[in-house]
Image: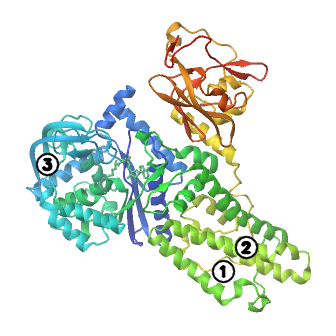
C-alpha cells in the first residue's frame, strides 16, 4: 500500500464457482485489468478485487451431480479462475472467496450491526414465491409457475419463514442518492432504468434461506443461511479487510480504511438491480449516520454481453468459447486487444474466433508488431543499433509530414484524446486512436520515405537517421499508450527499444513524442506477434476446446479430419481418438454403454474452409441431430440425402469449426488410406431403430 498516492478501488463481480470461466467472464476481468493498469499509470494506488461466489443451491446441486462435496467443487473451480487470470496477465491485487472464514465473519457482523443501528431494517416473516437457483433471483412473490427474467429457466417454489430486509423503507433514500450522485449508475440509460424501477415501488426482500445448508449461517439462528446476494455483495468489503465496520475499529484492516468505498463496481448488465438498488440500501442500513461519500460506491458501471450467434454466451446455453485455448494459440494480448477493440463498451458485442484471428493479423502482426520489428531491424542495420539523433538538417523544409505544424498539432492531441477515452472507458476509441498512429506515423510513413532505399548513400545519412528517429519515437509512444491493453507485447517492445525504466512509470496523459532518448542502445530484436495461419489456429483452438468440454478425450477436432498417421479417416469420420495398436477385450456391459441408432440423412452440406468435413442433419426418430463427419472426400453431399446410416447417439457433443456435432457416424475403414465407407442396411429399417 502506497500512502503517498491517491487510492482507486475497483471490483469485478465475484463469479459463480459452479463451473469454469468462459470468454464472457474473462471479458469483465480484462476490462477491469485495463482500467487498473491505466489508473496505475495515472499515479493511483490501485486495489483491484475479484473472486468467486461459492454458496447457494446451484452449487450444492452441481456438486451432488458430480458426486463430490460443494467444498471440493468450489475449491477446484476457484483454482481454474485464478489460473486463467494468471494466463491473461490480470493484475488483481485481492481475491476473495465467499467460503473463507474472514468473509463469513464480515457478513455476520454486517447484519449484526444493521440489526443494532437500524432495528427496523430486518424482520422475520413467511415467504412464498418463485426463486431462480441459477441467478439467485426472487422471480415472483406468488406460487404460480414463472420463468427467471435473467436466464429464462423455470423458477422453483419456495415456501418458508425467512429474514427480510425492509427495502420498501429505502425508496426515497435511494432516489435521493441517484439525485446526489447522478453518475451512480453508468451508462446514463441504465441509470434511468434503475430510477424507474425504484419509483415504481420496492418490495421487501428475503435475505435468508432455510431449506439450504450450503451458505453462511445467520448469527444466532443457524437454521437459516444468508441469501446468496447479501453474502456475495459483502465480499466487496470483506475482500479488502472489512471486519465489523465499527467507528475506529482496530479489526478492520488499514487496507479497508484506505480503499473503501469502491470507486467502481464493474458488472454485466443483468445484475444491475442487485448493485444499484439492493447494495446501496444494505449499506444505508449499516451506516445510517454516515455521509454518503464515506461509504457509498462511486459508480456502478454496467457493460453489455458478449454474444455468440446472437445469444448471451453462457454455460447453460452451451454456446461458450473458452479463453484458455485462444491464449495458448495466440497469446493473451490477442484476446485482450480483440475484446476491447471490437466490443463498443457498454453495448452487446458479437464474439467470433474468425474475426479475432483476422484482427490479430491485421492490427497486431501486420500492424504494431511489424512496425516495431521493421523499425528496430533498420536501426540495428543502418544506425549501429542505437536510436539515431534527429539531425539539425531535418526540419520543416525537408517536407516530411512530421514537421508540418498540422502534424504536430494532431500528434499533441493524441495523448489527450487517448487518456480521455481511457477515463471514459471508451476502449474501442482508445484502440482506434492508437492504431491510427501506427498507420499514419508508422507504416504509411516508412512506405512513403523508404529509408532502406537511401541507406547506402552517405549524402542521405541524415535523412535515414531522421526517418528512423521518427519511426522509433512513434513505436515508443504507441507502446506506452497501448500498455494497459496489451501489457505483454508492449513490455517486450519496451525492452527491445532499450528502455531501462519501467513502462508503468510513464504517464499516458503526458506522453510527448520524443520521449525516447537518442543514443539509446536497442535490445535483442524479437517478433512479438508472429503471423497466424487462420485455418491452423482455428483447428488448434477447437482441439483444445474439445478437450475442455470432454476432458481426457484428446479428440482431434476438424484437424483430425485431415488424417493423421494413426487415425484412419473412418475413425475420424467417427470423431474418435486414434485406436491403440492392441485392443483389450471389453465386457458386454462396456459395449452396452454405446447407444447406436438408425438415422436417415435429411440434408448434407460442405463446411467452408474444411475440405474433409460435411455437416449433416440426421433424423434419429425422436429428433433430428446435427452431425459433422469427415467423409467429404468420399461422398458428395447430394448423394447422402435419404441414406440410412448408423449413428452413435450418446456421445458428448463436441465443436468443430465453431459448429456442434451431436453424434458420430459409423464407417468401415478401407484400404491403406483408410477410406471411410458408411455402414448402412440392405433391408428397410425405420429411423430411430436401436442397433445392438
Ligand atoms: N455471482 C454473481 C455476481 C455477484 S457480485 C457480488 C454472478 N456471477 S456470474 O458468474 O454469473 O458472473 C456474472 C458476471 O460475469 C457478469 O455480470 C458479467 O460481468 C460476466 N459475464 C458472464 N457472461 C457474460 C457474457 N456473455 N458477456 C459479458 N459478460 C459476461 O452474477
Q: Residue at x 53, y 47 (%)?
A: 323
Task: Say whether residue 504 is visible.
Answer: no
Q: Quadrant of residue 294?
A: bottom left
**Mark 3 and mark 1 residues within 8 Å of each other at the beta carbon:** no
Q: Which secondary structure lies at badge 1?
A: loop
- Give x and y (percent) for residue 374: 76, 66
**Mark sitting earlier along the chain (2/1):** 2
**Left/right of residue 368 with respect to residue 658 in the rendered view:** right
Q: Quadrant of the N terminus?
A: bottom left
Residue 546 placed where, x, y %? 56, 35
Spatial separation of the CA atoms under disc 2 and disc 3: 65 Å
Outermost residue to the bottom: 397
In screen coordinates, is 141 left or right of 521?
Answer: left
Residue 437, compared with residue 654, is above or below; it is below
What is the CA distance from the residue labelled 3 to the residue labelled 1? 62 Å
Give the labeled residue for mark 1: 514
Task: Report whether 632 appears left or right of 586.
Answer: right
For discs 3 and 1, the disc positioned in front in the rendered view: 3
Tell me, yes or no, if residue 136 can be seen here: yes
Q: Which residue is mark 3?
A: 164
Residue 58, label in figure = none
- Report which residue position mark 2 lands on: 444
Q: Secondary structure at mark 2?
A: helix
Amino acid at each position: 500500500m502506497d500512502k503517498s498516492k491517491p487510492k482507486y478501488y475497483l471490483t469485478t463481480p465475484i463469479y459463480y464457482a459452479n463451473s469454469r470461466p468462459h470468454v464472457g467472464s474473462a471479458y469483465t476481468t480484462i476490462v477491469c485489468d485495463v482500467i487498473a493498469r491505466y489508473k496505475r499509470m495515472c499515479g493511483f494506488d490501485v486495489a483491484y478485487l475479484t473472486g468467486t461466489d461459492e454458496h447457494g443451491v446451484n452449487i450444492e446441486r452441481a456438486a451432488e451431480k458430480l458426486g463430490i462435496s460443494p467444498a471440493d467443487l468450489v475449491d477446484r473451480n476457484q483454482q481454474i479462475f485464478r489460473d486463467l487470470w494468471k494466463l491473461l496477465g490480470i493484475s488483481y491485487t485481492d481475491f476473495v472467496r465467499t467460503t473463507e472464514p474472514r468473509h463469513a465473519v464480515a457478513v455476520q457482523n454486517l447484519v449484526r450491526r444493521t440489526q443494532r443501528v437500524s432495528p427496523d431494517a430486518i424482520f422475520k416473516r413467511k415467504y412464498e414465491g418463485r426463486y431462480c437457483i441459477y441467478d439467485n433471483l426472487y422471480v415472483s412473490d406468488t406460487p404460480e409457475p414463472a420463468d427467471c427474467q435473467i436466464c429464462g429457466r423455470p423458477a422453483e417454489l419456495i415456501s418458508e419463514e425467512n429474514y427480510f430486509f425492509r427495502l420498501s423503507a429505502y425508496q426515497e433514500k435511494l432516489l435521493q442518492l441517484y439525485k446526489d450522485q447522478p453518475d451512480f449508475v453508468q451508462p446514463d440509460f441504465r441509470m434511468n432504468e434503475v430510477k424507474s424501477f425504484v419509483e415504481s415501488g420496492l418490495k421487501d426482500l428475503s435475505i435468508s434461506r432455510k431449506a439450504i445448508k450450503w451458505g453462511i449461517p445467520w448469527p444466532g439462528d443457524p437454521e437459516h443461511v444468508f441469501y446468496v446476494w447479501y453474502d456475495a455483495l459483502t465480499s466487496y468489503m470483506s475482500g479488502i479487510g472489512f471486519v465489523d465496520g465499527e467507528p475506529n475499529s482496530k479489526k478492520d484492516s488499514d487496507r479497508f480504511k484506505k480503499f473503501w468505498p469502491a470507486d467502481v463496481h464493474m458488472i454485466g448488465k443483468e445484475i444491475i438491480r442487485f448493485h444499484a438498488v439492493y447494495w446501496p440500501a444494505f449499506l444505508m442500513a449499516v451506516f445510517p449516520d454516515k455521509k454518503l461519500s464515506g461509504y457509498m460506491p462511486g459508480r456502478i458501471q454496467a457493460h453489455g454481453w458478449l454474444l455468440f450467434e446472437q445469444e448471451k454466451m453462457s454455460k447453460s446455453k452451451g454456446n461458450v468459447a473458452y479463453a484458455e485455448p485462444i491464449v495458448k494459440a495466440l497469446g493473451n494480448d490477442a484476446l485482450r486487444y480483440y475484446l476491447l477493440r471490437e466490443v463498443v463498451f457498454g453495448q452487446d458485442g458479437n464474439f467470433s474466433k474468425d474475426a479475432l484471428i483476422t484482427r490479430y493479423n491485421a492490427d497486431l502482426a501486420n500492424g504494431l508488431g511489424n512496425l516495431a520489428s521493421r523499425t528496430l531491424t533498420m536501426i540495428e542495420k543502418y544506425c549501429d543499433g542505437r536510436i539515431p539523433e534527429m539531425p539539425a538538417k531535418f526540419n520543416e523544409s525537408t517536407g516530411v509530414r512530421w514537421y508540418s505544424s498540422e502534424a504536430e498539432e494532431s500528434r499533441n492531441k493524441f495523448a489527450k484524446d487517448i487518456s480521455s477515452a481511457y477515463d471514459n472507458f471508451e476502449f474501442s476509441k482508445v484502440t482506434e486512436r492508437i492504431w491510427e498512429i501506427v498507420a499514419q506515423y508508422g507504416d504509411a510513413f516508412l512506405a512513403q520515405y523508404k529509408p532502406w532505399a537511401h541507406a547506402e548513400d552517405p549524402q542521405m545519412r541524415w535523412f535515414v537517421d531522421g526517418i528512423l528517429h521518427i519511426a522509433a519515437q512513434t513505436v515508443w509512444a504507441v507502446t506506452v499508450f497501448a500498455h494497459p491493453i496489451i501489457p505483454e507485447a508492449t513490455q517486450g517492445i519496451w525492452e527491445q527499444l532499450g528502455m531501462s525504466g519501467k513502462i508503468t512509470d510513464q504517464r499516458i496523459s503526458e506522453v510527448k513524442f520524443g520521449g525516447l532518448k537518442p543514443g539509446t542502445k536497442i535490445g535483442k530484436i524479437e517478433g512479438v506477434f508472429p503471423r497466424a495461419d487462420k485455418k491452423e489456429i482455428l483447428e488448434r483452438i477447437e482441439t483444445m476446446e474439445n478437450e475442455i468440454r470432454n476432458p481426457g478425450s484428446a479428440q482431434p477436432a476438424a484437424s483430425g479430419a485431415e488424417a493423421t498417421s494413426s487415425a484412419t479417416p473412418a475413425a475420424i469420420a467417427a470423431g474418435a481418438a486414434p485406436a491403440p495398436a492392441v485392443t483389450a477385450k471389453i465386457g458386454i456391459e462396456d459395449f452396452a454403454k454405446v447407444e447406436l441408432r438408425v438415422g436417415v440423412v435429411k440434408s448434407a452440406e460442405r463446411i467452408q474452409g474444411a475440405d474433409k468435413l460435411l455437416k449433416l442433419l440426421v433424423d434419429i426418430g425422436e429428433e433430428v441431430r446435427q452431425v459433422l463427419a469427415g467423409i467429404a472426400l468420399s461422398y458428395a453431399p447430394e448423394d447422402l440425402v435419404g441414406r440410412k446410416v448408423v449413428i452413435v447417439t450418446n456421445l458428448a457433443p463436441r465443436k468443430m469449426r465453431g459448429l456442434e456435432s451431436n453424434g458420430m457416424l459409423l464407417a468401415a475403414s478401407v484400404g491403406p488410406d483408410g477410406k471411410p465407407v458408411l455402414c448402412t442396411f440392405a433391408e428397410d429399417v425405420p429411423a430411430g431403430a436401436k442397433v445392438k
